[in-house]
Amino acid sequence: MITVPRGLILSLAALFSTYHVILALYSLDAPTSPVPPLLAVLLYALATVMSLWPTCPARMPLWLAFFNVAVCVAVPLLVGSQLDGSVADNGYATWYVAAVGTLMTITATRRRATLSWVGVGFLVVHTIVWAGAGSLASMGVIGSVVWVFVAVTLARALAKAGRDARQYGLAEREATEWQAAQEAHLYERQVRLAQTIRLAAPMLRRVIQERGTLSDGQRKECRYLEAAIRDEIRGRRLLNDAVRREVMAARRRGATVTLLDEGGIDDLVGTDLEVVLNTLADAMAATTAATIIARTAADGSGTAVTVVGINSPDPRLSALGQDSPDEEVDLWLEIPRAEHAQGASAGQATRRH
């Protein structure tokens, strides 16, 4: 987008304002007394300097806008009091008409449109009362009104363009984020599909070769593979080669293993993630629990993964008529997510009855 340096705009406005001040000083000998016009020049110069101060924000402060309106009321009254409105041409003595238009144009450009209309509106009323409606064109009042109108229109158009640009930028960022998310989902699906094919393809080929007639051992192997495929879907980032190996070993000895990745370790990458997963694999290798549940912790906590191993009560106690005890917690391990997780191991697990 093409932009105009702010300093250039301020410089042009300062040149116009200085030109009006020069005309005012040049015409000081025209009025009856030079004191009111000189006071008007000082007020106008003060308002212009404050309005064009380089460090001011883009939107003019409300108090300054009101001060500019007050100056636009005072200047015509001060200068007009020393001139004869019935004279057809007062020459440069009516410098205040263009000065008011310039000051109100600056006010409108700095996003105070309503007050700029108030200031130029007073100029129109004053001119009609002081010199008649026919003087609006000859004194340049219509030109001042046009300047303010153009400034207000351009300010609103630029503001709308700025809002549209921000909205388009926001929409572009959202579209980029959506595209990145879709690409990430597609990549993850491809990875999961490749992993599933790698696990299931040998057994599927065997099923085809045997024409669906499988031994009990092969059927168990199919169930193990089905559970492993579910792990790839539900476990996601809880899996590496070591964890897959220990999960399969636990299932082969009859344990029930559940892996639940709920997004709590999505921010872990590289070595940090491998440390957590290797600690999880060590914990699963060290336990003999009948049920093992590994679950990612909530976001923002110091724990990455919680591992619980549970043993069922001994069924022989119920056969003897004794009350069955509660389930026995064989393993309880919270794997931290910080770098000191390297010191964590299955030996840190606690056994509770």
Image (cartoon, helix red, strand yellow):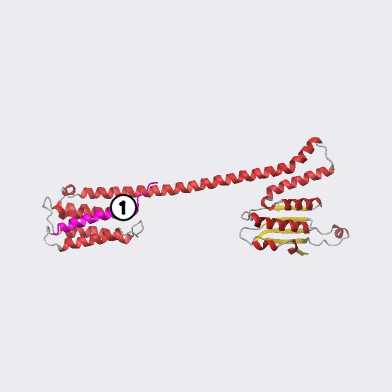
| Local secondary structure at mark 1 | helix
Look at 67% across and 45% down and name the residue there.
192
Image coordinates for residue 189, horizontal then vertical, percent: 64, 44
Q: Indicate the quadrant where residue 351 lies.
A: bottom right
| Residue 134 among those drawn in magenta | no
Point out the residue furthest to the front here.
Answer: 271
Instruction: Check the picture and name the quadrant holding the C terminus.
Output: bottom right
- Examine the rendering and report whether any part of residue 225 can be seen: yes
Q: Is residue 21 magenta?
A: yes
Q: Which x, y percent locates residue 120?
A: 24, 53
Q: Nearer the viewer, residue 54 or 139?
A: 54
| Residue at x 78%, y 45% (from the top left corner) | 223
Please name the predominant secondary structure of the magenta segment in the image: helix
Does 342 sit left or right of 142 as displayed?
Answer: right
Q: Please, what is the three-letter code of the amino acid marked with disc 1?
A: Ile
Choose top left, top right, bottom left or bottom right for residue 118. Answer: bottom left
Residue 122 visible in image: no
Give how far across and how far down residue 294 sits, in percent: 71, 56
Which residue corresponds to mark 1? 9
Count of number-bearing discs = 1
Classify mark 1: residues with Cα within 10 Å, few (<14), some (14-19) or many (20+). few
In the image, taking residue 292 as reference, residue 90 lies left or right, namely left
Residue occupying image coordinates x 41% and y 49%: 163
The residue lying at 71 percent from left, 43 percent from top is 196
Residue 68 versus residue 198 in the image, above or below: below
Task: Report x, y in % for residue 104.
Answer: 27, 54
Q: Which residue is the extreme one toward the right?
A: 320
Image height check: is 48 above or below 209?
below
What's the magenta region?
Answer: 1-28
